[in-house]
Amino acid sequence: MKQKDFIKAVQQETGMDAALVEQLTVAVTDGIRDILTNGDNLSIQGFGSFEVRRKDERLSVHPATGKRFMVPPKIVPVFRPGVTLKDRIKTFTQSEPDTVGDSGLTDDIETSDNNDGQ
Amino acid sequence: MDNKLLLADLVQILADKGFPRKEAEVFARCFFQQVEKCAFAGETVKINGLGTFKLQKVESRKSVNVHTGEEFNIDEHYKFSYVPDADLKEAVNKPYAHFDNVEVDETPSSPLFSVYDSEKASGDEVKPAQPVVPAPPVSIHRDAVPEPEEGTGMNMSLNREEIAAEEPGPESSLVGLVFKVLGTCLLLGGIIYMFMHSESRKTTYKDAPQITIVKDSVDVAPVTAKVEKPAVEKVEKPAEQTTIQASTSVSAATAPALQTDNDLILLIGSDPLTWETATKVKVRRGDRLVNFSLQNYGEKVFWTYLYLANRDILSNPNSLPEGTVIRIPKAPKSVVNANDPASLTKARAVEVRLKERYD
């Protein structure tokens, strides 16, 4: 789904003018970017939070040449789903017909950040 | 920094941009609900400038309980994936944007393996003596092997004693032995690594203090001459060369005022300080010479020239105080050319020298 389709969907939901919705979408993405570049977090109730994480530098090896590289430290934006969203994903998983019912041992839903920086 | 903002703050930001508050709030709520809704409908939601949201299936896999060591199955499940847009990533990473991947040439495993057999270990152990007195060790290295080997020899014999002491024990001592050998190897590896490191540093310096050492070593050379003549011939030549080098650099150093960076000027072939000024820039927070270089010369490596062109104002290439006005010179095409491999390698050489000096 591209931005166009998304804007259309939001427009139908809110009944707002298409141009206004488009402007607001841009404003929201700009707003989130500004918040994150300031090093702040944005948490949205019921959805999740946008955060920035600092990743330390690390050594990596080029798989083909075997050369070692020092990958510099970086700051990356991450999204962590909130509790409500996590629960919804869990029930979604269970409602899937092809999955095996009870999942008492399953871990928390993983987000895109596996190795936490400091 | 590190503030936790809520939806209300986002709405405030929208209101500050001139949108009616009420609509902004309705929209902001709806925005994230819609993302969630579309994702659950199995669609990939891509929002320009923010990123891509998707509900992703994770196949079932086996895992181990870290406390009990029990194996268990992680069932197939879904996860909410978010991949940030490249623009957003870049904007967030801006404070670190000047960093680059750096190739590391040392292979940490090699010193460990070379220590593993004692012969190589003694050979390696001798090397660290070389940089301090460049000339004579060549002969020491070949003839006086038993002497320097004592160090490692002691270590090894100690090791053997330990082994002998441990021997009575049956299989369990074998495991302990392996651990001990590995431990000492690691230790030796570490020591050698440190030595090598200090060696590489020392050899690359061609500063005044070392020159005096070279001169001393010329006096020392005849002593070793008794041991082996051809080696001494080899020895004396490099000593002469270095003294010649020393004299040239000394004469050059006495000429202009800013002495420390003169060898770099010689290396470049012209002094960036004399280049004609193209523009002047006031340093803002987060600015780096690397960035200025990339903007003006098309390559990051030429930042050294920017430093040299401003070395009358800047005390150290690593610090660029906010508010300083630095000048960006018009660089001669022959020296600064992003498409010319020769000028790139020269710039890298200058960079290496500068880093050695100030890091």
Image: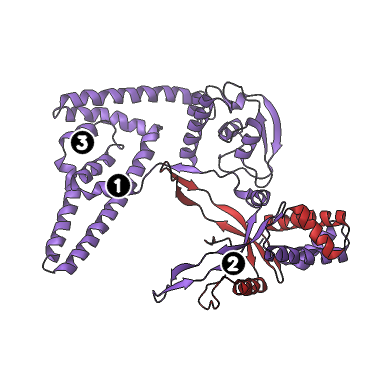
- Label 3: state its secondary structure: helix
Q: Amino acid at mark 3?
A: His
Chain B pictured colour: purple
The percent position of residue B29, horizontal first and vertical second, equals 78, 67
- Indicate the quadrant where residue B178 lies: bottom left
On the same chain, marks 3 and 1? The answer is yes
**What whole-number distance in Å separates the C-alpha atoms at marks 3 and 1?**
19 Å
- Label 1: state its secondary structure: helix
- Label ID, residue B78: 2
Q: Is residue B206 above or below residue B125?
A: above
Give the crowd class for mark 3: few <14, some 14-19, many >=20 residues within 10 Å.
some
Give the crowd class for mark 2: few <14, some 14-19, many >=20 residues within 10 Å.
many
- Label ID, residue B111: 1
Q: Is residue B145 above or below residue B80?
A: above
Q: Earlier in the sequence, mark 2 or mark 1?
A: 2
Chain letter for mark 3: B
The quadrant the N terminus of chain B occupies is bottom right
User: Which chain: red?
Assistant: A
- Label 2: state its secondary structure: strand
- Indicate the quadrant where residue A39 lies: bottom right
Q: Residue at x 49, y 29 (%)?
A: B345
Residue closest to the eye, B113 or A104: A104
Q: Mark 3 = which residue?
A: B141
Is A6 left or right of B258, judged from the image as shown?
right
**What whole-number distance in Å separates the C-alpha atoms at marks 2 and 3?**
65 Å
Q: Are marks 2 and 1 in contact (CB under 8 Å)?
A: no
Residue depth check, mark 2 versus mark 3: number of the one nearer the observer? 2
